[in-house]
Image (cartoon, helix red, strand yellow):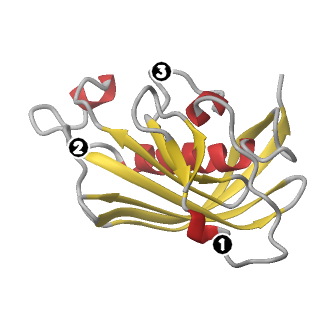
Amino acid sequence: MTAAGSTNGNAPAVVPSEVTAGVADAPAVPPVVGDPVALLPHRPPFRFVDAVDELVPGEHVVARYRVTGEEAFLAGHFPGNPVFPGVIQLEALAQAGAIALLSDARYAGSLPLFGGVEKARFRRQVRPGDEMVLTVTMETLSARGGWGSATATVGGKACCQARLFFVLAPAG
């Protein structure tokens, strides 16, 4: 495995060597310097990625977010029975996908925006204490945006799946 950056002081993010091993004409995967989460323009309380475990710039990302129970919106969704909203699960997936985009030199400095969602499905409730594993694989990319397939899991079971459309805008 090759290092791809740190993960908020935890174990280093890695790109599995099997992703590029044995592919003679595959371009070398450039390392991401520093914490890939820092590439996001989002900041708390609206950042829903804690760490990156795998990253192939412009292609694939596996990240994590732990629902702490301290998120302000949980007080009203639902009082006494907090459930992490499905739309925020989609946002977490989009933020993970944005890391895959922004780590690619072609898109560095862009502002990735949500352009659309297709085939969104919510499979199970996510509650405080759950850690979502966010996996996004880019399908098609152009200079203006692209599509990615995304799945969030908790304990190895899908909680949210969707096809996400990213639009790239100039930052600033």
Q: Do the numbered discs 3 and 2 sit on residues whose CB atoms are within 8 Å?
A: no
Residue beneath the point at 65% across and 72% down: 21
Q: Position of residue 77 (x, y in %)?
A: 25, 36
The residue that mark 1 highlights is 21
Residues packed near mark 1 inside 10 Å, few (<14), some (14 to 19) or many (20 plus): few
Q: Mark 3 or mark 2: which comes first in sequence?
A: 3
Residue beneath the point at 78% across and 47% down: 104
Q: Position of residue 121 (x, y in %)?
A: 41, 67
Q: Is residue 72 above or below residue 158?
A: above
Circle 1: residue type: Ala
Determine which quarter of the picture holds residue 137.
bottom right
The residue that mark 3 highlights is 44
Q: From the image, state whether disc 3 or disc 2 is nearer to you.
A: 3
Label 2: element kind: loop
Residues packed near mark 2 inside 10 Å, few (<14), some (14 to 19) or many (20 plus): some
Q: Is residue 75 above or below residue 81?
A: above
Whether residue 91 is visible: no
Q: Position of residue 50 (x, y in %)?
A: 43, 34
Q: Quadrant of the C terminus?
A: top right
**Residue 4 shows which numbered tag?**
none
Residue beneath the point at 25% across and 23% down: 70
Label 3: element kind: loop
Whether residue 160 is visible: yes
Circle 2: residue type: Val
Circle 3: residue type: Pro
Horizontally, residue 78 falls left or right of residue 48, namely left
Residue beneath the point at 65% across and 45% down: 98
Residues packed near mark 3 inside 10 Å, few (<14), some (14 to 19) or many (20 plus): few
Q: From the image, state whether disc 2 or disc 1 is nearer to you.
A: 1
Please state which of residues 1 and 14 is positioned toward the viewer in this rendering.
Answer: 1
Horizontally, residue 160 falls left or right of residue 148, namely left
**Residue 83 shows which numbered tag?**
2
